[in-house]
Amino acid sequence: MSKNALTASAVSLSRNEAGKRFSHTEDAEALQELRAEVVGALTTDHWERPWRVYDLDAMSLVEVNHLVERGLMTPAFSEEAGEARGFAVYGNNQASLEINGVEHFHLIGFREGDQLESLWSLLSVLDDRLEAVASYAFDPRWGYLTAYPGKAGTGLRAYATLHVPALMLTGKLAATALELVGRGLGIAPLWGGAGGVVQISNVARQTGPESDIVAEVENMSRAITEKERSVRKMLMREHPVQARDQIGRALGAAQHAWVMTFHEAVNLISAGQVGMEQGLVEAPGLAAESAFSLMSRLQPAHIVLEHMEVKTDCLDSPEIDEIRARVMREVFAGAIVR
């Protein structure tokens, strides 16, 4: 993947137990039995790496949101309630499993970078081992059955996160979205579209080989990346002063702000990253880690757990914005526009 495609990758698999109704209609006792059976299987030594099982009832709001921010838990699952829910993380945060959410089982893999194929390989292995514990609901015509019929089939969703601020700024992302629809894919803004960060994924019900779905998302990601690179070159060629001005203003705010929202930070990091990739900016602190990693660790729950001595469950605390601004000043210290 081109260096201009600030990316992260995710793959998920939705499965349901054949002997039970979907979570939203099944009795709590039956779901609790299913959770106990699966958790028991996860704690055996039959896995290459251990599972870490979480007690959701004992977790704080910030701890739950930290898992969401890291891509290990879906927002929908974090907002649900119910004593029968379960959650576990595999190995060193290589994958996770939601139990009795919308689906009985939801396997998730998330990594920074272009990692769709390796994630699919890992989840495929974990899926096979889970099937030895549970009897998956499967129909010869419809494939794996899911609570939402549109997800039936492979039950697989592949996601690629791309950094495409030039396409967003010029309005060319709309045409790209239409092209994706014709291929059974969709595009959605991540973090409200801050910084031009978007996510593409397969959205249509698909019954073909899972590897084909992953390859299609990868191929379209590369095509969009090339479009983004071309548009950036065009903007630099036709509007060089405006481009330098926007990037310079971003560096100024990053170096001198004392209060900063998450969305503002993402926009400033995005501008700085584009400046570095176009050879306009020298920013040793920003170059020391991926822009996506920096954006991720500036999310509210990350700030609370990693920077605040006195923990709070209030993710709107003014102190979070102050600490975020401090981190940005440190990262962008010494950054200059050539």
Image: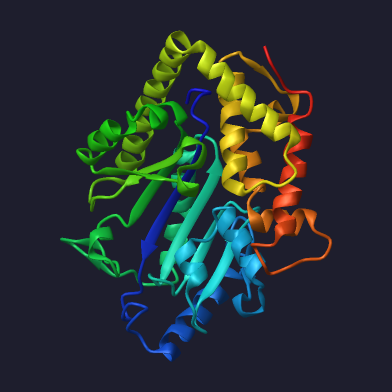
Scheme by which the image is coloured: rainbow
Quadrant of image for the C terminus? top right
The residue that appears at 50% across and 42% down in the rendered structure is 194
Where is residue 209 shown, x and y percent of the image?
28, 45
Taking 325 as reference, is 50 left or right? left
- Name the spot of residue 12 as percent of width and height, x first: 42, 54
The answer to whether residue 258 is left or right of residue 87 is: right
Q: Is residue 317 above or below residue 35?
A: above
Vertical comparison of 33 with 48: above or below: below
Question: 296 or 111: nearer the eye?
Answer: 296
**Of the pair 68 and 22, the residue shown nearer to us:** 68
- Residue at horizontal 40 percent and vertical 32 percent from the top: 168
For this orientation, the residue located farthest to the right is 309
- Residue 76 placement: quadrant: bottom left
Q: Is residue 305 above or below residue 78?
A: above
Tell me: residue 102, above or below residue 257.
below
The image quarter containing residue 61 is: bottom right
Q: Residue 78: percent from the left, percent from the top?
A: 52, 68
Looking at the image, the residue that sits furthest to the left is: 141
